[in-house]
Image (spheres, rainbow, N blue to C red):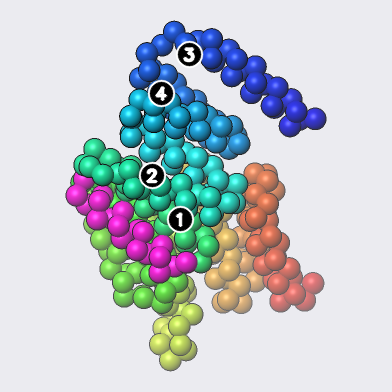
């Protein structure tokens, strides 16, 4: 019933939209369609984003506006990605990429490589994702976009870890730190410290001959710095990751009381925010911990 109601609302809005639409210039109409797509994207109405993106593509192609075609293709691709349809997303992103032929579309090109990297990372295509992120980094450097560059370096460190390229992981995090000390972005610091914690945690998982006692402590110290940043920013969803990671390290160190405290806090967050995928991970680790405790 809710789906039918949603379609009726969309149909009514579209009729009203078209009445308003006919009195505008073509450029204004393109902007209206694009902004409407962004608004629908923000509330997770991806099916409607796809519909509006198709309308935008048709109008933009009639007006020979590559810029709007690229943005519409990217919005449509992002929607398919969110709907767990990566193949459709790939095709649309590569179609948009072919249209990025001059310097005016460099930001769009960087954005496309970033999204392709994210999809490939999620799909486990780590080598391809690394190439995607490196392509974005090259563009961000040329644009002098320090915020995006730092964010991308942090993402790239995760790929190096997955590929067991620990020296490369460390190098890109060091570069990210230099940039962060210039731009002082609190959110990026939160991501950076979590990534640095993950780096030390990965080193601990290496061959036992290479382990050092301080790896887990270094990991936990950085996770804690990340956690404190997200708590100060009142972002519970982002706080979940370092909070959970700290619990896991306490569990490895057999400090089960502290591990339980962290996992229970994580459980409160996933239930309050209704994060279904994260619930599986948190509940699973809680079950293992209760087994360790003998409960």
Q: Which residue is mark 2?
A: 96
Q: Which mark is residue 30?
A: 4
**Pointer 3 with pointer 1, Cβ within 8 A:** no
Q: Which residues are magenta?
A: 125-143
Would you call the spot at circle 1 few (<14 residues within 10 Å), some (14-19), or many (20 or more)? Answer: many
Q: Which mark is residue 21?
A: 3
* Foreground of the two, 164 or 81: 81
Q: How many angstroms separate mark 2 from mark 1 (CA)?
A: 16 Å
**Pointer 1 with pointer 4, Cβ within 8 A:** no
- Mark 1 lies on a secondary structure that is helix
Q: How many angstroms separate mark 3 from mark 1 (CA)?
A: 35 Å
Is tag 1's residue or tag 4's residue first in the polypeptide sequence? 4
* Foreground of the two, 162 or 36: 36
Residue 80 left/right relative to 96: right
Residue 248 left/right relative to 59: right
Q: Which residue is mark 1?
A: 118
- Mark 3 lies on a secondary structure that is helix
Q: Residue at x 48, y 13 (%)?
A: 21
Q: How many angstroms separate mark 4 from mark 2 (CA)?
A: 17 Å
- Mark 4 lies on a secondary structure that is helix
Is tag 4's residue or tag 2's residue first in the polypeptide sequence? 4
- Mark 2 lies on a secondary structure that is helix
Q: Is residue 182 magenta?
A: no
Would you call the spot at circle 3 few (<14 residues within 10 Å), some (14-19), or many (20 or more)? Answer: some
Is tag 3's residue or tag 4's residue first in the polypeptide sequence? 3
Is tag 3's residue or tag 2's residue first in the polypeptide sequence? 3
Q: How many angstroms separate mark 3 from mark 4 (CA)?
A: 10 Å
């Amino acid at each position: 019933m809710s789906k039918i109601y949603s379609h009726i609302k969309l149909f009514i809005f579209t009729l009203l939209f078209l009445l308003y639409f006919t009195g505008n210039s073509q450029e204004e109409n393109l902007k209206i369609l694009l902004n409407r797509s962004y608004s629908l994207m923000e509330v997770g109405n991806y099916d409607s984003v796809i519909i509006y993106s198709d309308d935008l593509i048709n109008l933009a192609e009639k007006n020979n506006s590559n810029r709007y075609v690229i943005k519409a293709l990217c919005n449509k691709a992002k929607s398919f990605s969110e709907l767990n349809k990566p193949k459709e997303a790939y095709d649309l992103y590569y179609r948009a990429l072919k249209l990025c032929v001059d310097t005016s579309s460099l930001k769009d090109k960087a954005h496309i490589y970033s999204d392709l990297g994210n999809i490939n990372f999620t799909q486990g295509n780590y080598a391809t994702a690394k190439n995607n992120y490196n392509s974005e980094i090259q563009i961000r450097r040329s644009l002098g976009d320090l915020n995006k560059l730092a964010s991308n370096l942090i993402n790239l460190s995760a790929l190096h870890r997955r590929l067991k390229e620990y020296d490369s992981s460390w190098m890109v995090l060091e570069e990210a730190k230099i940039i962060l000390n210039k731009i002082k972005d609190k959110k990026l610091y939160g991501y950076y410290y979590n990534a640095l914690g993950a780096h030390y945690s990965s080193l601990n998982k290496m061959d036992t001959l290479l382990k050092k006692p301080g790896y887990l402590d270094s990991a936990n110290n950085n996770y804690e710095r990340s956690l404190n940043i997200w708590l100060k920013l009142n972002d519970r969803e982002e706080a979940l990751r370092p909070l959970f990671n700290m619990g896991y390290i306490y569990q490895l160190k057999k400090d089960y009381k502290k591990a339980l405290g962290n996992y229970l806090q994580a459980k409160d967050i996933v239930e309050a925010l209704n994060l279904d995928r994260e619930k599986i991970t948190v509940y699973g680790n809680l079950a293992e911990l209760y087994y360790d405790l003998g409960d």
